[in-house]
Structure formats: structure tokens, C-alpha cells
Amino acid sequence: MNKNIAIRRVRSVHRRAKPTDTRELGFGRYFSDHFFATEFDRTNGWNLTRIEPMRPLQIDAAAICLHYGQEVFEGLKAYRGKDNGIYLFRWRRNAARLRNSCSRLMMETVDEEFFGRAVKTLVLVDQDWIPNEPDCSLYIRPTIIATDPFLGVRAGDEYAFYIIVGPVGAYYPGGFNPIRIWVSDEDVRAVKGGLGEAKTAANYAHSLCAQQKATALGYSQVLWLDAIHHQWVEEVGTMNIFFRTKDEVITPPLAGTILPGVTRDSVITLCRHWGIPVQERPISIDEVIDRTASGELLECFGTGTAAVISPVGTLSYQGRETVINQHRTGELAQRLYDYLTRLQRGEEEDVFGWVERIDHQEIEELARWKE
Ligand SMILES: Cc1ncc(COP(=O)(O)O)c(C=O)c1O
């Protein structure tokens, strides 16, 4: 469909400042010299495909995305290996999820190969922005927005697909420590039939109110429960959630309200590969609290691209705190974190075919540069 589109490249003459100390990187604060962009209209399809110096976007103040929220995005990372290679992890999953999000929001989408070429060429152009330090990476944010200048609720006919990238630091500058979580029993993240499984801005805007309550009470993130019974565990902040008992691992099923995380799928596959049974089944907050009290629930952790694995040490529900595994990192969380972070940098045997080392020559050819 959009396989053969050439990517025009305009090199930036200005080099943006990079922090010299990677401890200052944080997350989402720095952006590289260039961005990828392409535009869609019904006559030309995707066109004006280019990589150009990072700059503010020019869109009409009446653009549909700004008023009615037709916007979807993705989040993935490029890693610098010890062998100096550049690695991507399961990017096809992000391409597929972007397509699903587009379909949910009635938006024009891009095919997998085009997505891959766009990501890889931009990463190559700005490869000196990939930090070398362990635990640091280049965060990649592909985004599609409806750009027609039109006030009225309808699906757009014009779209922009753009990708920005920026270096991000270690998610745990102070070490791999469990987090404190506040269980929201009033605000909900998503409802069946809603937008929960799409990666779209509305879900995140909607989460801010509960997040503010959690922060004010001294907790770092919100644990979301289902919208009807306020009982069934769904996600934690912007991560999927897992529990481990002596015999198995449990994670809520993908039933429309939960984002299908790439890390979630990787953790399920890895656990099964290691001989640890995984159940994708509804788990209630009462079960979590009761089985923690009885000593059956041994660990809890969140999974997501940003943190990879984030152990949960304390849950606050209706004013009472439940401490899991004495607020220490569990052995499975640590094992998964170590394995995945090494695999993502090409330091583990890639048994599942999840890791792609970017081949410079192939990409130069694929890009069909028009300088
Ligand atoms: C709401 C939500 N859930 C789960 C995840 C984890 O998904 P992934 O593992 O693909 O990063 C994310 C992050 O993208 C998220 O925003």
C-alpha cells in the first residue's frame, strides 16, 4: 500500500543540546535533531514523506485532532548494544497496535513495512542520540493525527503521521526498587466498549485526575479497577499488571479495556517458556489482598516499555495498606528485568525472533533517499 514511498531527507544544520550527564536525561524531556513526517489526503494517499529538522508542527487551529481527539500514538525504544549495533524490540507489535488504535478511532493508518522503514530511517539519521550507557535508550514516539480544518464530529479525511525520538535515562536512577500504588475505587480508566485497548490521548488525559489523587497521598501510580464492579484489577498506571503465587503467574485478560502491552505479551511468553504457568484471568482486588495476607501471593509487578518491569511493594486500598513481599523486589521480577534488558541489547540468544539489529545498508536502500 505505502511500501514504495521515498523518504526525502533535509539535514538539520543546528545540533540540539544533549545533556552530558545521562543521569539528567529522565523521560520525555529531550528530543533529537530530526523528525519523520508524512501526510495523507484522499487524492494522494500518504505523500510529502520526509525526515527534517525538529520543529514545531504547523497545523490549522481548526484541525480535527485538536477539537475531537482523533489522535493515536505508540511508544517503543531503540537500544545501543555492547557491539555498537542498534537494536529494536518487537516493533511489528507496535505497528499492529497502531493500526488497531487507528481502526478504533476511524482513522487512516499506515502499513507495517512503512512504519518499520520510517522508524529505522529516523533512528539511523539520529543514531548519535542513542545513549551508550546501560539502562538508557532512544524512545520512539510514532503519532497519527487528523488534520482537516473542520469543526463538527466526523472522521477526518486528512492525516499526519509523524515520529519523534529522544534519549531517555534509566527508569530507576535510584536502583530497581518497588513502587507504592494507590488503588482507585472511584475513577476508572476505561469501560467495556470504550477506548481502553487503543493507545489514544483521551485515555491519558482521563487518567490525570486519579493520578493527582495518588500523588497527593504519597503514592507513585494508580491501580485501575473495572468500571462496573470496581473489583477487577485492570492495569497499573501506564503498565500491565502481574501477580505471582507459589504455583503460577496471573494477569488480567485482554477484554477490551486493557492496553495489549508488548511487554505483557513478552512476559507471558517468557514465563511459559521457563515452565511457569500463566493464567490470563480476572483477578479481584479482594483476592489480591486476601492472598497477600495469607502469604500465598508472593509478588506483584507492572510491565511496560518505559520501565520494562516495575515491582509493586505496597498497595493502598480504601485507606488500608497491603505490603507485598516485604516491599522487596521479587525473584521473578528481577529475573524478567535482567533477561529482557539484556535481550533488548542483543546480549541474549533471541529464541523468539523478537530482536532486530538495524542493518545500515538495507535501510539506506529502503529509504530511497531523495536528498
Ligand atoms: C495504559 C498502558 N498500559 C500498558 C502499557 C504497556 O504497554 P507496552 O508494554 O507495549 O509498553 C502502556 C504503555 O505503553 C500503557 O500506556
Image: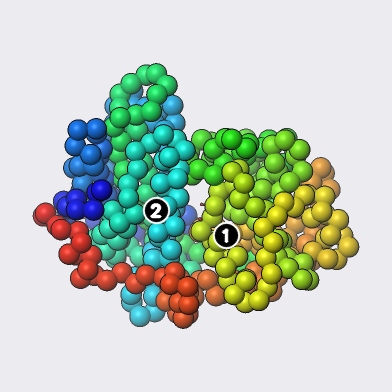
Q: Earlier in the sequence, mark 2 or mark 1?
A: 2
Question: What secondary structure is marked by label 1?
Answer: helix
User: Between 17 and 298, which is closer to the camera in this rendering?
Assistant: 298
Q: CA distance from mark 2 to mark 1?
A: 16 Å
Question: What secondary structure is marked by label 2?
Answer: helix
User: Between 349 and 371, which is closer to the camera in this rendering?
Assistant: 349
Q: Position of residue 55 (x, y in %)?
A: 27, 43
The outermost residue toward the right is: 294
Mark carried by residue 264:
1
Disc 1 beta carbon < 8 A from ligand 1? yes
The outermost residue toward the top is: 152
Amino acid type shown at disc 2: Ala
Quarter where residue 294 is shown = bottom right
- Packing grade of label 1 (10 A; few <14, some 14-19, many >=20) is many
Please state, as top left, top right, bottom left or bottom right, where the C terminus lies in the image: bottom left
- In the rendered view, would you say 261 is above or below 101? below
The outermost residue toward the front is: 1
Which residue corresponds to mark 2? 95
Q: Can you see residue 237?
A: no
- In the rendered view, would you say 239 is above or below 337? above
